[in-house]
Amino acid sequence: MADDGLSPTVCPYCALGCGFYIRKGEGGPGIEYMLDHPTNEGALCPKGNAALEVLGHPERLRFPLLKAGDGWRRISWEEALARLAGEIKETIRDYGPGALGFLGSAKCTNEENYLFQKMARLLGSKNVDCCARRCHSPTIPALNRAFGAACMTNPISDLANSGCIFAIGSNFAENHPLVARWALRAKDRGGFIIVADPRLTPTAWLADLHLQINLGTDVALLNGMMNVIIEEGLYNSKFVEERTVGFEELADKVRWYTPERAAEITGVSASSILRAARIYARSPASAILYSMGITQHSHGTDNVTACADLALICGHLGRSGAGLYPLRGQNNVQGACDMGVLADFYPGSVSVSDAEGIRRLEVAWGGASLPKGMGMTAEAMPVAAGDGDLRLLYVMGEDIVNSDSASSRGRRELANLDFLAVQDIFMTETAEIADLVLPAAAWAEKAGSYTSTERRVQWSPRAIDPPGEARSDLSTIIRLANLLGLNFDYSGPEEVLAEIGRVVKSYAGITRERAGARGGVIWPCPFLDHPGTPILHQDGFSAPEGRARIFAVDYQPPAEERSQDYPLLLTTGRVVIHYNAGSMTRRSLSLMRRAPELFVEVNPGDADQWGVVDGDLVEVETRRGEAWARARVTTRQERGVLFMPFHFPETNTLTSDVIDPVARIPEFKVAACRIGKMKGV
Ligand SMILES: Nc1nc2c(c(=O)[nH]1)N[C@H]1C(S)=C(S)[C@@H](COP(=O)(O)OP(=O)(O)OC[C@H]3O[C@@H](n4cnc5c(=O)[nH]c(N)nc54)[C@H](O)[C@@H]3O)O[C@H]1N2
Ligand SMILES: Nc1nc2c(c(=O)[nH]1)N[C@H]1C(S)=C(S)[C@@H](COP(=O)(O)OP(=O)(O)OC[C@H]3O[C@@H](n4cnc5c(=O)[nH]c(N)nc54)[C@H](O)[C@@H]3O)O[C@H]1N2
Ligand code: SF4
Ligand SMILES: [Mo]
C-alpha cells in the first residue's frame, strides 16, 4: 500500500486488464479510478465497478474442508496438505503419474500457474490444462500455423487507428466493454464497424453494418468475402508475394464461394457480403476482432484459420490500426497459456513434442526428467475419470462442473475419481463434489502478475488481507510441492517471476518493477532495457522462412442440425452483468439485482409457435437434458435460434460435447433443442 492509501490493482474479471486503485478506508475498501491507465483510462464496466463486492462476501471459503459424509469437516492446513500430498503419492505408487490430472486457473497469477504446471510435470504428469481449452484453444494451432505466434497482434487502444473494425463472433460491447471505447473513437474518426453475429447484440447496435449470420457458417462468410476481394483485385499483392505462402491454393478454394453461394449458406445477403468485403479490404488499416462465436465450434480451428487468411490476403497486419484480435477471455488466460498450463505446451510455447525445447527446461529445472507428448485436455480428464484412467484431479480456480459442456455427464464421471481436490475462493458446484476444498486468497489479497489479452504484463500488489485462513495459491502450491519432495525454494512471487524470465524468452526483460509501473510491459520483451512490443509482425512472421501461411479451408456445418424432435438451435454465451459460471457475480449484490435469474431469449415468431409467453418459466430441452429458464421474447434473436447465458448452472446440462478435432473445444455455440411451457406449471 502506497503512502496515499491507494494500492494499484488489475480487474479480476475479463482479459482487458483494466487498472484501478483500491483505497483502504473506514467502512472497508473502495475503488479509486486510475485515469492514466493505457487501456481503460479510468473507466470500468459494471463488473469492474463491483469487483470488491465479492472479497468480503460472507460465503468466502475461510478454512480447509474435508468431506465427511454428506457434509464437511474443518481441518488444519497441515492436515489438508498432508492429506493431498499423501493421496498424490499413493496414486503415483498405484497407477503411475499418468493417473494425476491438474487444472490450472486463468484467474490466478502467472507465478501461480507457472509453479502449478512445474509441480505437475516434475511429478511426471502430462495432464495439465485450463479453461483456455473451452475458450481460445482453436486460436493456438490456427495462428501458430499462420503466423508462428498465437496471440493478439495489436493493443486495444490501437483500434482507434483502424479505418474498419470487423468483429466476428465477438460481443465486445458486453464482454470486453472497454473495447467499445476505442472502437467508438475509430468511428469518431470516420472508421466503419462491421459486426457478424447471429444475434442483434449491443455490439451489433454499434455497427454500421450488421451481418446476421446463420450459426456456424462463418467459414462460408469469410470465404465469400475473400472471393470478392480476389475477384475484384482488392487484395494486397505485394504483401501476399513478399510475406506469405499458400495464396494460390486459397484463391482456388474460394472461387466456389461466390457471394450468392455464401449468401445461401450464411443467410447474409450477397450485397452485404460484397459491401463488407470491399470496405474491409479497401480501408487503409483494418482490424478483425473475434472471440467465442468463432472458436466454440466443432470446426473452430477452421474458423480462426479463415479469419487469419482474410487479414493476410489484405495485408492488414503488422501496422498500427491493422491487426487480428483474438479477444481472450479471463483476466489471466493469456498468462496461463504463456506459463504452459496447456496439455500441448510447456512454458514459452514450447511444444510437448519439442525434444530440444524440453531438454532446455530440464536443465533450467535442475536436471529433472520431464514427460513428453500430449497430455489429457480439460475435456478428456472427466472422460478419463469415468473410464478409471484418471484417479486424482487437482483443480485450482475453475468451476468445471458448471462451465464444461454436457455437464451432467461430467459430474457423473468426476464422481468416479478416487480423490478430487478443489482450491477456490467460494464453494462452487465443483467444490461441492470434491473430497478436499482449499480456501484461496483472491486477487487483491495476494501479489503477482497478470497478462492481459494485449500481452500486457501487470503486477498487482497485495492490498488487503484474505479472510479466515485463506492463503494465496502460490503459497499452497509451494508447500504442497515441498511435501512431495520437489524442493520449491521460493521466497515469494518476485522470485518466481525472475525464474519465468529465465525460462520464457518473451518475458526475459520483465521484472517486478517494470510490471509494477503504470500499464506494465507488453511482451515480447526479450531483455531488460527492451521497451516491449505492442505491435507484432512488423518485421515479418516467426513462421518458417519468415512468411505467414495462408491455409485454405472449406465450410462444414455444425455437428447438430434442426430436426423434427429438436426444431430449434440453442446458442449460449454471456451478458455484461455476469461472469462465466457465476461463482463471483452471482454473489455480487449490485449485479444480482440487475440480472437475478437464468433466461432464454426467444424470437416472437417462435414464441407464438411453441406457446411461450414473455416472462413465463419455460423448459428448454436438448439431447443431453432439460433446464428451466425465464422466457424473454425479443427480436434480438432470429427465428429458429434461442440464446441462453451460461452464468447459471442449468445451461451447461444442455450443451453439446462434440469437439473440434484439432483444438478439442466443445461446440458450446450450437445445440439442437426444443422449448415449451414447463410441465406442471
Ligand atoms: N460480461 C462478461 N464478460 C466476459 C465474460 C463473461 O462471462 N461475462 N467471460 C470472459 C471470457 S472467459 C470470454 S472467452 C470472453 C468471450 O467473449 P465473447 O466471445 O464476446 O462471448 P460470447 O457471448 O460467448 O460469444 C460472442 C458472440 O458470438 C455470437 N455467436 C454465436 N454463434 C456464432 C456463430 O456461429 N458465428 C458468429 N459469427 N457469431 C456467433 C454470439 O451471438 C455472441 O454474441 O468474454 C470474457 N468477458
Ligand atoms: N455454455 C457455455 N459454456 C461455456 C462457455 C460458453 O460460452 N458457453 N464458455 C467457456 C469459456 S470461454 C470459459 S473461459 C470457461 C470458463 O470456465 P471456468 O474457468 O471454470 O469458469 P469461471 O466461472 O470463471 O471459474 C473460475 C473459478 O475461479 C475462482 N477464482 C477466482 N479467483 C481465484 C483465485 O485467485 N484463486 C483460486 N484458486 N480461484 C479463484 C472463481 O471463484 C471460479 O470458481 O467456460 C466455458 N463454458
Ligand atoms: S472491461 Fe473487463 S477488465 Fe475492464 S472493468 Fe470490465 S471486466 Fe474488468
Ligand atoms: Mo473464456
Image: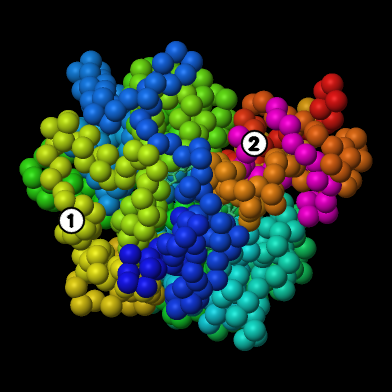
Q: Determine whether the residue tagged by mark 2 lies in a helix, strand or loop.
A: helix
Q: Is 281 above or below relative to 664? A: below
Q: Which residue is mark 2?
A: 651
Badge 2 residue CB within 8 Å of ligand 2: yes
> As drawn, which residue projects farthest toward the front?
26
Residue 262 shows up from this direction: no
Relative placement, left or right, of 370 versus 468 is left
Q: Is residue 92 covered in magenta?
A: no
Q: Could you tell me residue 52's position as x and y percent? A: 50, 55
The location of residue 297, given as percent across then percent down, is 57, 45
Residue topped by disc 1: 495
Q: Position of residue 524 (x, y in %)?
A: 29, 68
The residue lying at 22 percent from left, 22 percent from top is: 86
Q: Is residue 228 left or right of residue 473?
A: right
Q: Quadrant of the rendered structure where residue 129 is? A: top left
Disc 2 and disc 1 in contact, CB within 8 angstroms? no
Q: Seen from this angle, which residue lies furthest top?
A: 69
Determine the residue positioned at 70% across, 70% down.
Answer: 206
Of the pair 466 and 285, the residue shown nearer to us? 466
In front of the other: 78 or 367: 78
Query: Which residue lies at the image location 30% right of the left edge and 24% below the top edge?
Result: 99
Q: Which residues are magenta?
A: 626-649
Mark 2 or 1 closer to N-term? 1
**Residue 235 higher or lower than 575, as above or below:** below
Image quadrant assignment for residue 653? top right
- Label 2 is placed on what type of residue? Thr
Residue type at mark 1?
Glu
